Image (cartoon, rainbow, N blue to C red):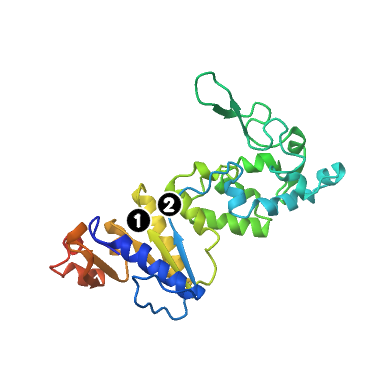
């Protein structure tokens, strides 16, 4: 979906197509302004936007990517944990006995500064790791003979953790997905509310990758905002993976690199506001290029 700002891209996709598809898949009535929608075989509509992932500081990259629960089970099976009578639940930094008693597993404490807003600083007891000292003494040894505690593992970035977790089949495969999304530099314990819009968008996709998506439509609203050209290339590979898994991918976009890679373009316009609101041109990038009515075509 292309067109100058205000040409009607959002109105057409986010305010018309997406609500219509959601109504269709749930058996509800179509929005009043939508006359009809045809989408054979479509069961799911997934809007992947750049809004931050929650405000809960207890949500981390590991918990969001469904890795932390599996790691807790693995550490509960170690001899160190058995000797101390610690089960998987003990390793939760939300409710477990091994969470830091000073910050209550949040990794930070608030300082009350007179006449100013409270200031959050890393917890002086656990130094931001969220875990009590006992958790550091429970170590898992991999087949290569390397041993790490769970707090130490959570401090590693995804790229480094992949090496340590190569014997953990499920954890390794999920970390590989994060790496393929260009998120290998994030640490497992990083808070999800602190991620940038582009990082949040790709992390939301982590659970969708590798699945058959023949009944799904993915909608991206200007996903390249704030991205470096190298990150745009990563995003294009993600789109291609979704398509290869059978998904339909709709992208509202201004970035010419993304537009050039589209199979099909719908160009709105010709201008913005009252000058917009109609389909000016549609077709392949080559056809749009040769359409004299399309401003997007001129820039392509």
- Residue at the disc numbered 2: 50
Q: Residue at x 44, y 66 (%)?
A: 218
- Residue at the disc numbered 1: 222
Q: Residue 46, image x and y in percent?
A: 47, 64
Evaluate whether residue 281 shows in this view: yes
Picture quadrant where residue 220 is located:
bottom left
Question: Which of these two is toward me, 171 or 48?
Answer: 48
Q: Residue at x 46, y 66 (%)?
A: 241
For the C terminus, the quadrant is: bottom left
- Tell me if 108 is positioned left or right of 4 in this view: right
Q: Residue at x 37, y 69 (%)?
A: 17
Q: Residue 211, image x and y in percent?
A: 54, 68
Q: Earlier in the sequence, mark 1 or mark 2?
A: 2
Question: Which of these two is toward me, 78 or 38?
Answer: 38
Secondary structure, mark 1, is loop
Return the residue found at the far top.
114
Question: Is disc 2 surrounded by few (<14), some (14 to 19) or many (20+) residues within 10 Å?
Answer: many
Q: Is 25 drawn above or below residue 229 in the view shown?
A: below
């Amino acid at each position: 979906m292309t067109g100058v700002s205000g040409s009607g891209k959002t109105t057409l996709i986010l305010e018309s197509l997406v609500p219509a598809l959601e109504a269709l898949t749930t058996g509800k009535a179509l929005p009043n302004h939508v006359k009809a929608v045809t989408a054979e075989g479509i069961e799911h509509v997934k809007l992947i936007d750049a809004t931050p992932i929650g405000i809960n500081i207890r949500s981390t990259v590991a918990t969001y990517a469904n890795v932390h629960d599996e790691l807790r089970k693995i550490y509960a099976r170690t001899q160190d944990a058995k000797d101390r009578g610690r089960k998987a639940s003990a390793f939760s930094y939300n409710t477990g006995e091994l969470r830091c008693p000073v910050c209550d597993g949040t990794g930070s404490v608030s300082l009350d500064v007179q006449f100013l807003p409270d200031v959050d600083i890393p917890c002086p007891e656990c130094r931001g790791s969220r875990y009590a000292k006992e958790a550091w003494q429970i170590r898992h040894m991999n087949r290569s003979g390397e041993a790490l505690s769970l707090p130490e593992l959570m401090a590693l970035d995804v790229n480094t953790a992949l090496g340590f977790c190569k014997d953990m089949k499920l954890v390794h495969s999920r970390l590989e997905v994060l790496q393929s999304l260009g998120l290998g530099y994030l640490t497992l314990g990083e808070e999800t509310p602190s991620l940038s819009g582009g990082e949040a968008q790709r992390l939301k996709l982590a659970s969708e990758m590798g699945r058959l998506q023949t009944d799904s439509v993915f909608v991206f609203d200007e996903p390249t905002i704030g991205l470096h050209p190298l990150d745009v290339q990563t995003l294009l590979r993600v789109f291609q993976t979704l398509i290869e898994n059978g998904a339909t991918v709709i992208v509202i976009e201004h970035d010419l690199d993304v537009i050039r890679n589209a199979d099909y373009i719908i160009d709105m316009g010709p201008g913005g506001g009252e000058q917009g609101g109609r389909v000016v041109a549609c077709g392949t990038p080559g056809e749009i290029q040769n359409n004299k009515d399309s401003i997007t075509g001129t820039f392509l």
